[in-house]
């Protein structure tokens, strides 16, 4: 009931200059950026229950404080290989369509802040079939940060699960 | 003007409350229609008030279109209330349509001003114009052309400001003779216990009279940079009968000032206001003010109001409002909180002293989201509790145990209470069918009445929400396809008005909803013909169709009986969708019909979707959950048995169970797990199983009329689970119905029994469903036994043989005493040890009620009690159980009794688990092998006893009845037989006859004979002894039997 609490939600994570914060996520040799506002939380992989007959990119389901959350494997989606669970593996909890989904990645790095002017279009050397999952690239000092289109990644079921 | 930040909550409140007001309007209008000229004043008044308050609040919030429509409805309702208009179906139609539109507008309230309601308003106006009060209208005719205006007077300048108000409303108001007053109001956009909420403020104003005009200053809400103001300034013009004093009193929390206002002709001639005591007469309008455009002027009026309140010197002191004419009673108004730095931002002290008017509410609105969250948290708490209990189990700290026991109880109660918040009456769904039946029967030219029963039956909110569409479809079907046209009904000797009955009731822990019509019924021949035509059936199949199967064709995808898809029941939705939707809810649907007499559809629904009883099983090292309600029976076959009972017919695995053939599905195969051995899954090659596994676990499940056996690796425990949905990536997996979180925190998947069958292409078997419960009497003279049924938890039913029960005591709980490690109670001067069922088998505990039943059993020479919460029934059973063997130690078998899966307890087995030392002495030390002839007609007992005796090193030869045993004796002689154990009641030759022959024949008379009975009467015992029976033993008292065998074997040897 407090009127001051009715501010919009999206604006909080936006730096005043229009710069946006991205969490860098590792999938194989790719460094991916996910907008921080899309991330609910980041966890170490806990016990996953394997779901029989599930699409190949689904790693299993996990118990996130009483909620059953599907965990999809980022490497399966982008690289067509299963993520190996290691010390650095993380599950990034994202929300899409009011549903939480976990994204299993090889690791999570620092938060990178940059403005929209630094985002370049996806270069053509990225494999074509994956390009649909990317929103753009940002040239960092040492390497390239590829911005992940979270909705495209989470929306993958429409393409594959039906087949 | 109304979608600014900060107003959302107020608007939401308005929408919710308006929806509540209008929720029943449909049925109320129909009731008004039904009453016709015989008006139920109270009812009409209620509808009138509902529409009135929607109108009023809509005006305040700037939803003008909503307000106008509600106003027109109100006018018509007013005429009905005043008996100037008789509500006929035509009028009610218009009102119903208007209320539909009103509801739609509320659903998307921000777009409501863009909705075109002119047609509806015109229709409503036409009713008013066409009504009997024409003379009145004509009387006003000359005035109708006269333009009126509403003026409010500025108290300082004395200047009048005209306001734009609908002419009709001005005319109405003037005719009513009410006073007109302009109120300066300030309302809070938040509220706590000390302030009135915006919405309740509005309602207070509405209670005082008719609001002609409102204007709200939203300016503070447009600017995102500044903090949203805590209050809103509103100008409202009220036509009221209340005195200024009363207005001040009622609105003391929100009133800034009261100003003069009046209605006058635009031509300048003034009309005195009825009942106005002060400032009589008219005030000449200042020419300049009168010429202003309405928009400007009203804004100006507000501005002035604003400046008055903020400039007022009396503000800060909390006294002396600026205008003598509008002086509030005393104390200040809690105004300007946002602007005035000296006053508290939230509440002024003056405000808190004046809130006696707020009544404590017994109901509050809580969003479903919060309830769901609570539910989740409670689930988490249950989980933590379970972990804690596991921890404390290994500890010896008594205090810790007490605390965790308490926590256990509280957690369960909490979970239950939260569940209750989700329960809603089915009336919510049922009541909307009045309209459906009325509209549809009208459209089809049929006559039909709706009868409702059991509207107060409660179901989980999720089910209530989901059941609406399927029910609507079924009700529409009943009217469209079931109920005949009136002429035809008369021809058939029926009441021309058909009846559709909706009935809800509880049965066997479920809710049953029935949709019954007294229409034409369903012609199964036509169904079959249709199915042939559509290629759903082949000619050969059609010929072999049972009546039931023919009816089930209705649920076949793509089947519709209407010759063409009507807009009534067609709508692109078939009965197959209805069935699928009901199944999704964990329900079932059945259809019964009698040609010429009507059709009944019966839907069985679980009470709640959220928590279901289930069985946890293991398959391929993962755990899966099967809802108990689809489980009919658990079958465990030893390797030896499985060779006999498992087979393949044309490549399909089957199980032979009580003369029936049941198709089998291997869960591993269904779930795409690798088969356990390279030889392939179990059922096809049962031999492959034998080496590795001692037994095959089969769960006989049922879905609709299909029954099949599901092979799993292991049966684990029964568990109450909270059903959670699977994410969108997994929603299409047919074999899974959802997921749950088990006690240890891992996620387990719930198997979809119907889905698995469908995925494995299992089809309806040519078997009639057997409604007869296995616990009921067969009546063919077979011997049987009485079973005592009881429950500790409503979801678990147990049976024990009455023969082993020595008595039942009903004692206060405190009479149970813990002595050392042993629970005891005193009965007839003796301490009887009490074994809690849950300590020895997988069972839910006996609830903590003040009194408890103790069933005292006598096993061997020992007595012990089992505490029981509820005694259900004593049932005679043929004991024709399958030798399903052990599901778990302590349980002999499971069967269906009173609609519930019932575990038949192995009482002596439980005693042996609990107190092994009681029976140690009975174990033979292997001195000499005992050979026994066992005569028992019940397969179940025979295999039970054989197994038990063999375990104790006794060689058993068994026979099904006395004559077979006698033949054997005569052929082979009695050498080497130490003892004969015989049942009394048997076909062909009973136990008495067998005993007589043995005892009369010198070849055998030395062999001791022990009779087995279920409940022996003294009469029988005398008869037996007269014939030479050596002993009696109660069936299933295995320890007693061992003692008896030992005693008589020795006797036999001596003889």
Image (tube, coloured by chain):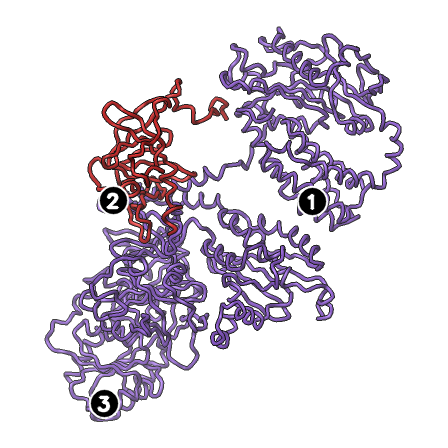
Residue position for label 2: A81
Q: Quadrant of the C terminus of chain B?
A: bottom left
The shade of chain A is red
Q: Residue furthest top?
A: B313
**What chain does badge 1 belong to?**
B
- In the figure, is residue B689 to the left or right of B736? left
Callouts 1 and 3 in the same chain: yes
Q: Is residue B293 visible?
A: yes
Q: Secondary structure at mark 1?
A: helix
Q: Is B892 located above or below residue B428 in the figure?
A: below
Using the image as rendered, state which of residue B990 and residue B70 is in the foreground. Answer: B70
User: Looking at the colours in the rendered structure, which chain would you say is drawn in purple?
Assistant: B
Callouts 1 and 2 in the same chain: no
Q: Closer to us: mark 2 or mark 3?
A: 2
Q: Is A81 located above or below residue B517 in the figure?
A: above
Callouts 2 and 3 in the same chain: no
Q: Is B477 located above or below residue B377 in the figure?
A: below
Residue shown at 52%/71% (left/top)? Answer: B532
Q: Secondary structure at mark 2?
A: loop
Disc number at residue B398? none
Residue shown at 72%/34% (left/top)? Answer: B71
Q: Closer to us: mark 1 or mark 3?
A: 1
Disc number at residue B96? 1
Residue position for label 3: B969
């Amino acid at each position: 009931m407090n009127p001051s609490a009715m501010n919009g939600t999206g604006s909080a994570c936006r730096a005043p200059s229009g710069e946006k914060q991205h969490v860098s996520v590792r999938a194989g040799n790719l460094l991916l950026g996910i907008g921080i506002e899309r991330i609910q939380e980041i966890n170490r992989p806990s016990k996953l229950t394997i779901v029989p007959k599930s699409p190949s990119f689904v790693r299993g389901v996990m118990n996130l404080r009483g909620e059953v959350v599907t965990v999809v494997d980022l490497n399966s989606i982008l690289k067509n290989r299963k993520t190996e669970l290691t010390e650095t593996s993380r599950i990034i909890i994202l929300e899409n369509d009011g549903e939480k989904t976990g994204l299993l990645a090889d690791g999570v790095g620092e938060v990178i802040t940059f403005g929209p002017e630094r985002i370049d279009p996806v270069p053509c050397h990225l494999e074509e079939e994956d390009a649909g999952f990317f929103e753009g690239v940002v040239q960092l000092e040492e390497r390239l940060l590829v911005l992940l289109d979270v909705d495209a990644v989470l929306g993958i079921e429409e393409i594959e699960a039906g087949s | 003007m109304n979608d600014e930040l900060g107003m959302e909550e107020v608007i939401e409140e308005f929408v919710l409350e308006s929806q509540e007001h209008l929720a029943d309007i449909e049925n109320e209008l129909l009731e008004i229609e039904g009453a016709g000229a015989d008006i139920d004043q109270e009812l009409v008044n209620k509808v009138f008030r509902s529409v009135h308050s929607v109108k009023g609040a809509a005006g305040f919030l700037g939803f003008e279109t909503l307000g106008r429509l509600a106003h027109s409805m109100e006018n018509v309702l007013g005429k009905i209330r005043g008996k100037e208009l008789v509500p006929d179906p035509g009028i009610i139609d218009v009102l119903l349509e208007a209320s539909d539109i009103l509801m739609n507008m509320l659903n998307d309230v921000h777009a409501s001003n863009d909705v075109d309601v002119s047609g509806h308003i015109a229709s409503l106006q036409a009713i008013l114009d066409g009504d009997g009060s024409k003379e009145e209208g004509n009387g006003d005719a000359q005035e109708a052309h006269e333009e009126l205006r509403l003026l409010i007077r500025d108290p300082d300048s004395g200047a009048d400001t005209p306001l734009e108000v609908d002419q009709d409303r001005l005319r109405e108001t003037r005719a009513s003779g009410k006073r007109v007053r302009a109120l300066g109001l300030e309302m809070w956009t938040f509220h706590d216990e000390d302030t009135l909420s915006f919405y309740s403020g509005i309602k207070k104003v509405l209670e005082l009279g008719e609001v002609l005009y409102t204007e709200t200053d939203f300016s503070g809400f447009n600017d995102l940079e500044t903090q949203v103001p805590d209050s809103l300034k509103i100008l409202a013009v009220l036509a009221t009968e209340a005195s200024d004093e009363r207005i001040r009193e009622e609105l003391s929390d929100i009133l800034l000032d009261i100003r003069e206002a009046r209605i006058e002709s635009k031509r300048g001639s003034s009309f005195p206001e009825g009942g106005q005591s002060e400032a009589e007469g008219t005030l000449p309008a200042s020419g300049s003010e009168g010429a202003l455009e309405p928009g400007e002027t009203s804004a100006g009026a507000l501005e002035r109001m604003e400046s008055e309140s903020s400039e007022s010197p009396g503000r800060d002191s909390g006294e002396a409002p600026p205008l003598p004419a509008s002086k509030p009673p005393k104390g200040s108004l809690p105004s300007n909180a946002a602007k005035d730095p000296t006053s508290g931002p939230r509440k002024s002290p003056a405000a808190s002293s004046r809130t006696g008017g707020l009544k404590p509410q017994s109901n509050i609105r809580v969003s479903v989201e919060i309830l769901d969250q609570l539910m989740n948290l409670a689930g988490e708490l249950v989980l933590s509790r379970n972990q804690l209990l596991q921890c404390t189990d290994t500890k010896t700290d008594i205090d810790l145990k007490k605390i965790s026991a308490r926590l256990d109880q509280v957690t369960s109660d909490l979970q239950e209470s939260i569940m209750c918040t989700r329960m809603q009456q089915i009336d919510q769904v049922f009541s909307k069918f009045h309209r459906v039946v009325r509209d549809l029967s009208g459209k089809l030219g049929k006559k039909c009445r709706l009868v409702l029963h059991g509207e107060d039956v409660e179901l989980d909110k999720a089910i209530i929400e989901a059941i609406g569409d399927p029910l609507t479809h079924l009700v529409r079907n009943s009217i469209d396809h079931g109920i005949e046209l009136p002429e035809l009904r008369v021809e058939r000797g029926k009441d021309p008005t058909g009846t559709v009955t909706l009935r809800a009731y509880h049965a066997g822990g479920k809710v049953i909803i029935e949709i019954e019509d007294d229409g034409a019924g369903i012609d199964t021949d036509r169904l079959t013909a249709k199915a042939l035509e559509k290629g759903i059936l082949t000619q050969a199949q059609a010929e072999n169709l049972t009546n039931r199967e023919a009816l089930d064709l209705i649920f076949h995808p793509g089947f519709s009986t209407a010759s063409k898809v009507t807009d009534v029941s067609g709508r692109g939705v078939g009965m197959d969708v209805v069935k699928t939707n009901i199944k999704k809810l964990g329900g079932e649907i059945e259809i019964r019909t009698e040609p010429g007499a009507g059709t009944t559809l019966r839907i069985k629904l679980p009470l709640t979707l959220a928590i279901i009883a289930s069985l946890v099983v293991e398959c391929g090292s993962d755990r899966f959950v099967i809802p108990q309600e689809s489980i009919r029976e658990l079958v465990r076959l030893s390797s030896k048995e499985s060779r006999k009972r498992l087979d393949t017919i044309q490549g399909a695995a089957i199980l032979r169970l009580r003369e029936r053939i049941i198709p089998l599905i291997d869960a591993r195969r269904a779930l795409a797990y690798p088969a356990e051995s390279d030889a392939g899954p179990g059922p096809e090659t049962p031999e492959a199983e034998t080496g590795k596994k001692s037994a095959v676990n089969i769960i006989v499940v049922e879905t609709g009329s299909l029954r099949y056996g599901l092979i799993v690796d292991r049966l684990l425990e029964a568990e109450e689970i909270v059903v959670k949905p699977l994410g969108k990536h997994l929603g299409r997996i047919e074999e899974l119905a959802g997921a749950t979180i088990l006690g240890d925190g891992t996620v387990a998947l719930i198997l979809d029994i119907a889905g698995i069958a469908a995925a494995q292409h299992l089809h309806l078997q040519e078997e009639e469903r057997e409604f007869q419960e296995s616990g009921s009497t067969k009546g063919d003279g077979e011997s049987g036994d009485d079973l005592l049924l009881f429950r500790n938890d409503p979801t678990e039913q147990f049976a024990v043989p009455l023969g082993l029960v020595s008595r039942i005591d009903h004692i206060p709980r405190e009479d149970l005493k813990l002595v050392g490690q042993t629970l005891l109670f005193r009965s007839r001067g003796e301490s009887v040890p009490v074994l809690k069922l849950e300590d020895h088998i997988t069972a839910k505990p006996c609830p903590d009620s003040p009194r408890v039943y103790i069933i005292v059993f006598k096993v061997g020479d020992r007595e012990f009690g089992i505490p029981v919460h509820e005694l259900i029934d004593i049932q005679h059973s043929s004991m024709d159980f399958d030798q399903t063997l052990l599901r778990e130690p302590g349980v002999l078998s499971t069967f269906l009794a009173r609609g519930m899966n019932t575990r038949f307890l192995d009482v002596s087995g439980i005693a042996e688990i609990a107190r092994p030392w009681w029976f140690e002495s009975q174990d033979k030390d292997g001195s000499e092998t005992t050979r026994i002839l066992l005569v028992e007609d019940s397969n179940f007992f025979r295999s039970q006893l054989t197994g038990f005796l063999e375990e104790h090193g006794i060689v058993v030869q068994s026979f099904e009845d006395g004559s077979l045993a006698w033949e054997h004796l005569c052929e082979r002689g009695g050498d080497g037989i130490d003892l004969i154990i015989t049942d009394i009641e048997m076909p062909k030759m009973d136990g008495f006859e067998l005993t007589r022959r043995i005892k009369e024949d010198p070849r055998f008379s030395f062999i001791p004979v022990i009779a087995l009975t279920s409940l022996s009467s003294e009469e029988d015992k005398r008869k037996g002894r007269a014939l030479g029976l050596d002993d009696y033993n109660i069936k299933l008292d295995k320890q007693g039997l061992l003692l008896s065998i030992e005693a008589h074997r020795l006797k036999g040897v001596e003889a």
